[in-house]
Image (cartoon, helix red, strand yellow):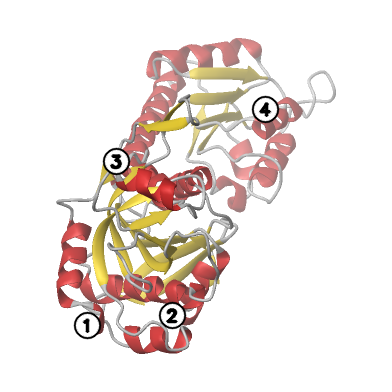
């Protein structure tokens, strides 16, 4: 643990440091003697525990020690500002009357107050409190690694891919999380669930991996779904088909080697699969049921595509995921050589799958759903983007509200 000790009597402060090291092996204890130095320390670093003498000077050598600097410091800690509020705050004093002088609004933020006695019994009391904080911290870490906070996270690369969710749910800004929106939805049993959604703001593997990892660690969702549009591999997926990423393949990871004609990429992919997971079983079930099993899906796609998309299919397929848009048939053939079943090509699914599979917090189930907006050829346009953004979002909504067992 990282512990800040604020005490104006050096000898007592050093005794507290000894108690800290005896009670919590390996703890990092910083001892300071006045309110200003303590404030600077908490502005620069986060502490797991603050042990605060309730009678300290504002600045060492300037004025007498009293309760007012400690009270002012506590007030600032619980007001918006630059100081990082410690996880736990423990008061300590040898003057029993100062306890009554600390206002109830401030005293409520102290986990306890240890009164220094002449017999030294206060050390045992302090040791017990430090041990409790350490156990509590370990419990919080365990919860962070194993317990979920949000039920659902929808993630997209582009803002227009997130747009359909604004019509499907009542979104509100998530406190303290810029760019993240919260919403409430009912699951298949009618139970209210807590969801969040966010658009990364750009395409690409690095941004997808970075944003997904950050949001998964912050929100700890049970289920994470990425939606949007992708390129389709001719013969494996048609325009408008909604693809479930059974495997994400990082096709452009490897080594470029010279050849007589031109440099050639020798791929060394490390695919990530969702097979044998709950979400994989849900995707299989939907593929079997077909697009018409999802209310309003095909009719709305027909309208948004101005009649071009008439019979979209649901497909479970490997995704080839790389760092660039594919518009060259020769590059596409190189990708197909990695896995003949590849149906979709995009720029985010592998980064998203990597962040989800190797989550540092509670690991979610995860799935990438993308609708085919082009055939990875040299002529590309955005005419089907709106329909494909809607389609993938609507399938995601159907999964969480009708199919998924939370």
Residue at image mark 2: 168
Q: Nearer the viewer, mark 2 or mark 4?
A: 2
The numbered disc on residue 271 is 3
In this figure, which residue is indicated by the disc labeled 4? 41
- Residue 101 visible (yes or no): yes
Residue 331 falls left or right of residue 284 = right
The answer to which image quadrant residue 295 occupies is bottom left
Residue visible at 59% across and 41% down in the picture: 85
Using the rendered image of the protein, determine whether residue 356 is visible from the camera's viewpoint: no
Find residue 293 and name its label. 1
Give the number of the disc on residue 405: none
Quadrant where the image shows the C terminus: bottom left
Q: Position of residue 401 (x, y in %)?
A: 28, 75
Say whether disc 4 or disc 1 marks the residue closer to the N-terminus.
Answer: 4
Badge 4 element: helix
Locate residue 340, reporting x and y percent. 24, 49
| CA separation in Å, label 2 and label 4 | 46 Å
Secondary element at image label 1: helix
Of label 2 and label 1, which has the lower sequence position?
2
Earlier residue among tags 3 and 1: 3
Residue at 38%, 41% in the rendered image = 251
């Amino acid at each position: 643990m990282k512990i800040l000790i604020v005490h104006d009597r050096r000898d007592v402060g050093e005794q507290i440091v000894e108690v800290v090291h005896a009670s919590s092996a390996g703890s990092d204890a910083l001892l300071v003697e006045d309110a200003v130095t303590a404030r600077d320390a908490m502005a620069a670093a986060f502490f797991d525990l603050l042990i605060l003498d309730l009678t300290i000077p504002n600045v060492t050598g300037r004025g007498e020690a009293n309760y007012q600097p400690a009270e002012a410091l506590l007030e600032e800690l619980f007001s918006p500002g630059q100081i990082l509020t410690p996880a736990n705050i423990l008061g300590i004093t040898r003057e029993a009357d100062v306890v009554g002088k600390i206002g109830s609004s401030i005293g409520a933020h102290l986990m306890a107050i240890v009164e220094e006695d002449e017999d030294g019994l206060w050390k045992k009391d302090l040791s017990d409190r430090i041990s409790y904080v350490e156990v509590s911290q370990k419990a919080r870490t365990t919860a962070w690694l194993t317990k979920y906070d949000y039920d659902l996270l929808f993630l997209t690369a582009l803002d227009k891919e997130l747009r359909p969710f604004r019509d499907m749910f009542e979104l509100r800004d998530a406190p303290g999380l810029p760019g993240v929106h919260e919403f409430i939805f009912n699951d298949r049993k009618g139970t209210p669930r807590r969801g969040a959604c966010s658009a990364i703001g750009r395409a690409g593997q690095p941004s997808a991996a970075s944003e997904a990892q950050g949001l998964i660690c912050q929100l700890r969702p049970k289920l994470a779904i990425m939606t949007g549009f992708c390129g389709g591999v001719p013969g494996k997926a048609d325009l408008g088909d909604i693809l479930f990423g059974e495997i994400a393949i990082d096709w452009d990871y490897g080594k470029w080697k010279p050849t007589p004609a031109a440099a050639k990429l020798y791929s060394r992919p490390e695919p990530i699969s969702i097979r044998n997971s709950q979400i994989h079983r849900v995707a299989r079930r939907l593929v079997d049921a077909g697009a018409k099993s999802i209310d309003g899906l095909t009719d709305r796609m027909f309208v948004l595509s101005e009649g071009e998309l008439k019979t979209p299919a649901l497909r479970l397929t490997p995704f080839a995921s790389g760092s660039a848009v594919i518009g060259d048939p020769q590059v596409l053939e190189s990708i197909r050589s990695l896995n003949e079943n590849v149906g979709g090509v995009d720029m985010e699914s592998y980064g998203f799958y990597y962040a989800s599979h190797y989550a540092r917090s509670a690991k979610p189930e995860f799935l990438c759903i993308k609708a085919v907006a082009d055939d990875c050829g040299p002529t590309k346009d955005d005419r089907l983007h709106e329909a494909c953004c809607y389609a993938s979002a609507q399938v995601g909504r159907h999964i969480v509200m009708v199919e998924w067992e939370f």
